[in-house]
């Protein structure tokens, strides 16, 4: 077993190995946002996805290995370039991906046109329809979260929620599930999730380096 461990260390040392945390991802996104701020009346937003403790490892284009330090973070930054066009760029613990040009969906158009409902939306926490006196061990709390930041016509605001709060994954039905799923924020989130799933499955995300 020791020999296998030392062989792994030697292998990692030879091919190169990088570990990056959330601060690294945030710095990449901040750099891109600074570029967008140079534009006149920038309109952009991003979504950050993560599940606490979920570690991912990737083989980089140069053959080296890269992994998240503790938790893997992926950020999807969207910015408007034309009336009917946007760009989307992915960032994660191992760097940035090449930007993609996309059409603006009806859901995103609605947000860009009227952001007030989105600003008011608040995802309510999971609340069981009954109180279980023996609740310990019956509640499987998920640690996956999503964070948003919007910069729309000089109006800046943030939103976040736990994916668990949208579900009925506990012993008793979540009385806030229907409310949460009806929010403009969640409709936007579902739209983005479908888009990202399509890009991932079709292999459209390519690393820049």
Image (tube, rainbow, N blue to C red):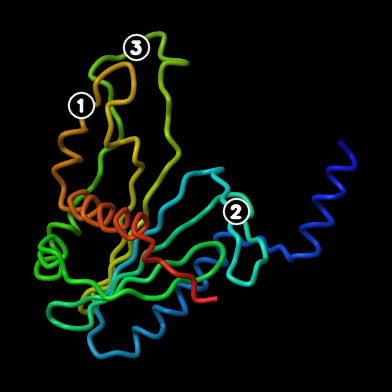
Question: Residue 58 appears at what percent x and percent y?
Answer: 58, 58
60, above or below 43, in the image: above
Q: Residues within 10 Å of mark 1 (few under 14, many from 20)?
A: some
User: What residue does disc 2 label?
Assistant: 57
User: What residue does disc 1 label?
Assistant: 175
> 36 or 2, which is in the foreground?
2
Secondary structure at badge 3 equals loop
Which residue sits at x=60%, y=61%?
59
**Marks 3 and 1, the one that precedes in the sequence:** 3
Horizontal placement of 139 versus 116: left or right?
Answer: right
Viewer-side label of 1, 2: 2
Task: Tell me the quadrant of the picture where the N terminus can be found.
Answer: top right
> 102 or 30, which is in the foreground?
102
- Quadrant in the picture for residue 41: bottom left
Confirm or deny contact between disc 3 and disc 2 (CB under 8 A): no
Which residue sits at x=16%, y=47%?
183
- Quadrant in the picture for residue 117: bottom left
Q: In the displayed orientation, state which residue is furthest to the right.
A: 3
Confirm or deny contact between disc 1 and disc 2 (CB under 8 A): no
Q: CA distance from mark 3 to mark 2?
A: 40 Å
> 67 or 158, which is in the foreground?
67
Question: Residue 140 appears at what percent x and percent y?
Answer: 42, 25
User: What residue does disc 3 label?
Assistant: 132
Secondary structure at badge 2 equals strand
Which residue sits at x=49%, y=71%?
207
Q: CA distance from mark 1 to mark 2?
A: 38 Å
């Amino acid at each position: 077993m020791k020999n296998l461990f030392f062989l792994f260390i030697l292998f990692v040392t030879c091919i190169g190995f990088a570990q990056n945390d959330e601060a690294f991802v945030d710095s990449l996104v901040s750099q891109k946002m600074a570029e967008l701020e140079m534009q006149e009346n920038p309109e952009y937003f991003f979504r950050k996805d993560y599940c606490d403790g979920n570690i991912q490892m990737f083989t980089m284009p140069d053959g080296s290995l890269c992994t998240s330090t503790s938790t893997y973070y992926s950020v999807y930054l969207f910015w408007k370039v034309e009336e009917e066009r946007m760009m989307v760029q992915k960032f994660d613990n191992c760097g940035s991906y090449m930007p993609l040009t996309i059409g603006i969906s009806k859901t995103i158009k609605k947000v860009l046109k009227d952001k007030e409902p989105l600003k008011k939306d608040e995802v309510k926490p999971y609340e069981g329809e009954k109180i279980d006196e023996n609740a310990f061990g019956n509640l499987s709390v998920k640690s996956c979260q999503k964070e948003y930041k919007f910069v729309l016509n000089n109006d800046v605001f943030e939103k976040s929620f736990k994916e668990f709060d949208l579900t009925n994954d506990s012993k008793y039905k979540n009385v806030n599930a229907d409310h949460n799923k009806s929010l403009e924020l969640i409709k936007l989130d579902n739209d983005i999730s479908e888009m990202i799933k399509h890009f991932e499955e079709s292999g459209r995300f390519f690393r820049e380096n």
